[in-house]
Image: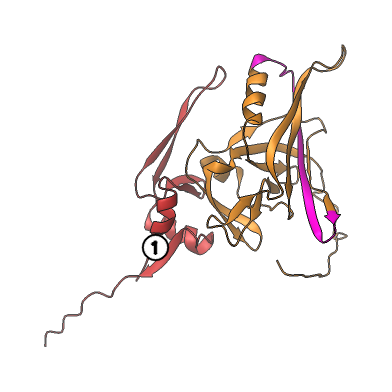
Amino acid sequence: MACGITALNSNGGCALVQGGILYTYAAKKSDISSITFTAGLITAMTLGVGAGFVKLEYDIDNTALFEQPATRNGNSITHAQRAFVKFKGLFTAAGRSWAQAAQECCDLVLIHRLATGEAVVQGVEESSVNAAGFTGTQSLATRWVGNMTTDVGGAESRLEGEFQGVAYSYAPLTDLTDTEIEAL
Amino acid sequence: MAKYIVKPAFLSKSPNARTQVRGVGVSLNGQEQKISIPGDKNTPATEKVFRAASQEDLRYLYEEKGMTREIEKVDEPAAAVNKKD
């Protein structure tokens, strides 16, 4: 994208500013055949293999978030994408099985639904040279990095962790609805 | 009249490509596809069905969703004109 700096104003109202992510759809990057970007917004996806996106429903307790702070090294700017999620009580065999399998995925794509209704796609970058129209996060692939903790008496045992990757661009948003994502 | 086709080059790379049209799964290889979703102790196994994309589906994906990488619009030759005097 070419350089551009235009007027921007967030003082038009105070509606829909809620933070946090509510739930996430996840798939292996290798299951996605192509992604269509329209002015930077993801408007369509095709899948070639796999069972489609699965829904991750984690705790809604003001802990789940997605962020992508940038770091500058000379003229290179990268965004460390990070989504933190927590599953209370899943210090179980099923939780361990899920976490181990997720950890062994080399490159993941996550669609996080924000409390505002927007959806942001972690783990992909637009590409004009790749025939599929996208790549994974180019600086560091997106993977599950988790923890299973008993914590202490009076606290919660849980499975928690982050989806982490490093991109050269901001994570794109998508106009796909939940119904459309689940139909893929 | 224009016709919409899935690009052969795209299908050769992704022979089982599928997408969705307004929340309904569609197959781009001309054939219906069925995907089995395994169940677990909490969720029964299910199956997702992707019907073969229609011309209207392909038009929607090309014209309204911008899927020009996967789909192309081709002009069908005009019907033969009867030049009988």
- What percent of the width, then of the height, locates residue A68? 79, 47
In the displayed image of the protein, which residue is found farthest to the top? A153
Residue A59 seen in render? no
Who's the residue at 63% across and 20% down the image? Answer: A97
Quadrant showing the N terminus of chain A: bottom right
Label 1 chain ID: B
Q: Is residue A127 above or below residue A165?
A: below
Task: Tell me the crowding category of disc 1: few under 14, some 14 to 19, or many 20 or more residues within 10 angstroms, Cα based.
Answer: many
Tell me the colour chain B is drawn in: red
Name which residue type carries label 1: Tyr
- Over which residues does the magenta segment extend? A72-93
Please name the residue that numbered disc 1 is placed on.
B4
Q: Residue furthest bottom?
A: B85
Tell me residue A113's x, y (percent). 69, 42
Give above or below for A100 relative to B12: above
Q: Residue A60 is drawn in which quadrant?
A: top right
Image point (51%, 42%), residue name? A183
Residue A35 located left or right of residue A86: left
Up-down relation of residue A80 to residue A8 (above or below): above
In the picture, measured across the screen, residue A87 lies left or right of residue A33, that is: right
The residue that appears at 73% across and 54% down in the rendered structure is A168
Q: Magenta segment: does it hold A86?
A: yes
Q: Nearer the viewer, residue A5 or A69?
A: A69
* SS at mark 1 in the image: strand
- Number of numbered discs present? 1
Residue lying farthest to the left in this orientation? B85
